[in-house]
């Protein structure tokens, strides 16, 4: 073996070792961050079991019913949703068990199919609201039209609404949902119910990975945010905001509560509520003899391209544009959670670097076995670091599988382990697209449009 080959092999070994050390440290930081959230959730759960639930019987949605329920407005933005909005509204008005509500549906003048689908439902509690400009505008712009329609209805009827509930055109709404909002508002300024993606037998991997992420996020992560005193972001659906609080947000913003220049207006809404002194919480409560969680269900993207498109919008709005817009408000807990949200971009790219290093390590191991280049020193600290990361990874997969199994059963829980790879690939691709998209936004400075995925409704 000539000297040049030995030198190159030694240099390659040093590069792989240093790169592996750098990535391993990154994984360790992320793993410890996630472990801290896990431990907070566990401590909170054990404390509540040992104190609150020993003294008080767990409430159900039915036990929260009051004799004088308040009027609630449901607002549904619907651009190009003619395929699903009719079924969604029919299901909602047929199954929703609440005496005082009205549904405001945002439509566009260049979407006759959507308008026809809403009109065909034929329910007097549904009020179509036509946006002033052809679509697509932004979702926030449509929501602002709906806000103004709510105000006009209150003026015309002298009926004040207690809360406004956000829903999308593909949502399957739980029949007891409004009773939960009515009982907890105004004690809470925002109530977020869990969102549970619907399993899709035709897409067990792409659509399925949303099951794992939401099962963990809406049973643990949002709970920890509240426990630490940080802002709880709205999910954009199954969110009820106190009417007076939304009015205060609108007044502070010049009359419109939703920022039309924002890609993730729902995420920012939670931070604005916290800034005005309002309290928000994720509420998990059961209903009926089968003790089913009161939650909103919906189908999520079933193809890789659609999933990347959706998640890149989330990452752009939260981790990039949201950084510019929000900065680092609030106390230590708020800033910590903002850092967790914004690290998602770096974590996705770090994961891909880890996968690439696996290949490089295998090549390096082969070279070491064949030629033993000079400089291939025996490492002492790195193996311990790698074993620590392996333990954190095993813990992470176990936690995710546990939450998925709790929400969807043991079969889906087992699938959550290999689906973590799919989740990582989708998130990495979304991070790449989000970075390019954000750079384009900065260069163009143009008006945003409503970039939405194609929605499906169960049975459709």
Image (cartoon, rainbow, N blue to C red):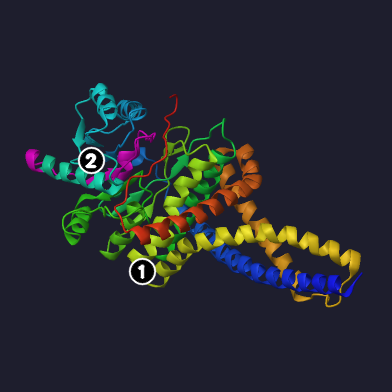
Crowd tier of the residue under label 2, counting other residues whose Cα lies within 10 Å: few below 14, some 14–19, many 20 or above: many
Decide whether residue 438 is among the magenta residues. no
- Picture quarter containing residue 131? top left
- Determine whether label 1 and label 2 are within 8 Å by CB: no
Q: Write down the quadrant of residue 443 in the picture.
A: bottom left
The picture places residue 210, in percent across and down from the top left corner, at: 52, 44
Q: Is residue 265 above or below residue 452?
A: below
Say which quarter of the image contains residue 202. top right
Q: Position of residue 44 (x, y in %)?
A: 49, 60
146, above or below 346, in the image: above
Please tell me how crowded label 1 is: few (under 14), some (14-19), or many (20+) other residues with Cα within 10 Å. few
Q: Is residue 339 above or below residue 408?
A: below
Q: Which of disc 2 and disc 1 is earlier in sequence?
A: 2
**Residue in the picture at 21% in, 35% down:** 102
Q: Quadrant of the C terminus?
A: top left
Q: Position of residue 213 (x, y in %)?
A: 52, 48
* Residue bearing mark 2: 73
Note whether residue 55 is visible: no
Gap between marks 1 and 2, in whole Å?
32 Å
Q: Tell us which disc is closer to us: 1 or 2.
A: 1
Residue at 70% in and 73% down: 18
Label 2's element? Answer: strand
For this view, does 87 lie left or right of residue 431? Answer: left
> The N terminus lies in which quarter of the figure?
bottom right
Q: Is residue 162 magenta?
A: yes
Q: Secondary structure at mark 1?
A: loop
Q: What span is colored magenta in the figure?
A: 155-181
Residue ID for mark 1:
327
The percent coordinates of residue 451 (x first, y second) are 37, 44
Numbered-mark total: 2
Q: Is residue 284 above or below residue 359?
A: above
């Amino acid at each position: 073996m000539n000297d040049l080959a030995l030198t190159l092999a030694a240099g390659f070994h040093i590069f792989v070792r240093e790169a592996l050390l750098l990535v391993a440290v990154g994984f360790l930081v992320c793993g410890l961050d996630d472990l801290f959230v896990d431990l907070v959730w566990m401590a909170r759960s054990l404390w509540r079991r040992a104190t609150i639930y020993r003294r008080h019987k767990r409430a159900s949605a039915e036990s929260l019913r009051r004799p004088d329920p308040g009027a609630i407005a449901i607002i549904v933005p619907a651009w190009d949703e003619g395929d699903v909005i009719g079924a969604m509204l029919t299901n909602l008005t047929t199954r929703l068990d609440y005496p005082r509500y009205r549904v405001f549906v945002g439509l566009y003048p260049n979407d006759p199919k959507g308008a026809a689908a809403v009109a065909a439902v034929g329910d007097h509690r549904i009020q179509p609201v036509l946006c002033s400009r052809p679509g697509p505008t932004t979702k926030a712009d449509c929501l602002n039209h709906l806000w103004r329609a709510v105000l006009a209805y209150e003026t015309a009827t002298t009926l004040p609404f207690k809360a406004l509930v956000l829903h999308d055109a593909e949502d399957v709404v739980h029949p007891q949902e409004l009773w939960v909002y009515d009982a907890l508002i105004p004690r809470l300024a925002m109530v977020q119910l869990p969102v549970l993606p619907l399993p899709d037998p035709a897409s067990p991997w792409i659509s399925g990975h949303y099951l794992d992420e939401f099962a963990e996020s809406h049973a643990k992560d949002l709970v920890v945010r509240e426990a630490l005193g940080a802002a709880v972001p709205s999910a954009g659906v199954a969110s009820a905001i106190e009417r007076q609080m939304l009015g205060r947000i609108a007044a502070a913003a010049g009359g419109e509560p939703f920022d039309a220049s924002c890609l993730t207006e729902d995420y920012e809404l939670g931070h604005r509520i916290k800034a005005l002194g309002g309290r928000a919480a994720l509420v998990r409560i059961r209903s009926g003899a089968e003790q089913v969680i009161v939650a909103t269900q919906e189908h999520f993207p079933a193809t890789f391209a659609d999933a990347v498109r959706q998640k890149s919008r989330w990452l752009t709005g939260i981790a990039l544009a949201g950084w510019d817009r929000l900065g680092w408000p609030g106390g230590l807990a708020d800033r910590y959670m903002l850092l967790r949200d914004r690290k998602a971009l770096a974590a996705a790219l770090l994961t891909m670097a880890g996968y690439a290093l696996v290949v490089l390590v295998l090549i390096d191991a082969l070279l070491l076995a064949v030629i033993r280049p000079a400089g291939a020193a025996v490492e002492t600290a790195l193996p311990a670091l790698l074993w620590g990361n392996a333990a954190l990874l095993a813990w992470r997969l176990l936690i995710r599988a546990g939450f998925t199994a709790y929400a969807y059963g043991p079969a889906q829980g087992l699938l959550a382990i290999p689906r973590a790879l799919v989740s990582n690939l989708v998130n990495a691709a979304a991070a790449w697209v989000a970075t390019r998209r954000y750079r384009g936004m900065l260069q163009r400075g143009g008006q945003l449009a409503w970039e939405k995925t194609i929605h499906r409704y169960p049975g459709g």
